[in-house]
Amino acid sequence: MGPWNRLALRWKLVVLNAGVVCVAGLTVLMLVHHIDSPSVYALMHKAAAAATPQMAQQAYDSAVDRQVIPTVLIAAVLAIALNLAVVTVALRPLGALRGATRRLAAGEPSVRVGSGARDDIGEVAKSFDDMAAQLQRLEELRQQAADDVAHELRTPLHNILGLVEGMRDGVMSADRATLERVHREVLRLTSIVDDLRTLAEARAARFHLHRERVLLTALAREVTRGFEPQAQVRGLNLLVNGPADGDVEAEADPRRVFQVLHNLVENAVRYARSCTEIDLGIRRVAGAVRVEVSDQGEEIPADVVPFIFERFVRADRSRGRTSGGAGIGLAIVRELVAAHGGQTGAESRDSVVTVWFELPSDDAAPAQQHASAHSSMAPVIE
């Protein structure tokens, strides 16, 4: 069954129909050999003894009608029946695929075909299963995103409602301190809405890029300077490591790349352990430039790493917005990098988390060894 399962559908049908033809041919031969010989002899004698050619032709036609035509009809019926049977068997996986498609369209995302064949239909079934799994994952993410948005908005709204009702009922005084608390909650709501708007803009960024030559090392140093006050409070050391032979250039939108770097460094500063280093490494790889932001902090669970660029995904679900953000920063990073035709990724190993992105570069040199004394790199999560 192994070689048969790997055989292409067209060759399966050729083999099966060749088998049908052989069976039909053997059937004709067997029936011809078992024709009633005395009857044939009598008909042929009658034809030979016929007085006229017309009578001989009539005798011959009678022999054909009584002996040959029934034989051919029996063989044809048998061939049709066999062909129907073999084609039905060959195309049976299509029935399963059709049923699975209808169930998926009816809202059953967990449906799978699970075909073990390696032919054309087996490949289609595998593609269907992959698509169904992706759709199920997207539906789960959509539902999770809706729940997270509701949760993120509900908390500050309830806080504002409680404060306003307290002042209305006279339980709390409408003094400066209370109004300041209301103001902070309003700012939280505004920040969430701004994040969502930024994410929407990032998805559409590919249509509004203003590309120019960007010096990535210089831009990275500019970004890290903006985080120096926060880093000093926590004893963090921000390092930017670029190639020794000069800055790395990329054809990109400098404002968008600045936003990408800002989000990655912001996450690193948020999640890195105090008194550790955050390493921002920039190097050339084949056909691209690669930027890695690493910090030493809590290790990301292996089942979370593939999804940290999704919206509202956090390594630690218990973190609130004040400590862990809304989980949109890396989703913005992914969209902006994708708008440039690049790619993103992350890894977590031994309490070192590294988030990276690559931008296409026509003049990028072959991959070089990243010479940094600080090889411990830990990613960033939003």
Image (tube, grey):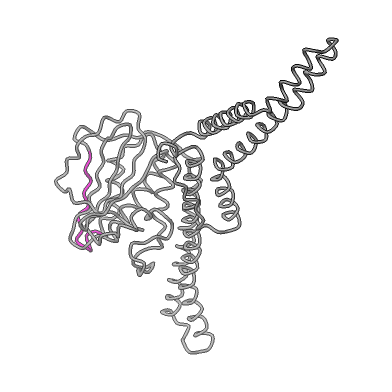
Judge by depth and name the residue closer to the eye, 231 or 241.
Answer: 241
Outermost residue toward the left in this view: 373
| Count of marks, rendered view | 0
Image coordinates for residue 326, horizontal then vertical, percent: 41, 63
Q: Examine the structure image and report whether residue 7 is included in the region drawn in magenta.
A: no
Q: Which residue is at the far top?
A: 52
Picture coordinates of residue 259, whole percent (x, y): 38, 49
Q: Residue at x 56, y 54 (%)?
A: 104
Range of residues picked out in magenta: 231-242
From the image, which quarter does the N terminus lie in? top left
In this rendering, the answer to whether 39 lies above or below 267 is above
Vertical placement of residue 33 versus 181, above or below = above
Residue 60 position in % (x across, y down): 77, 18
Give the camera-side residue of 147 and 265: 147
173 relative to 97 in the view: left or right: left
Say which of 87 and 212 sits in front. Answer: 87
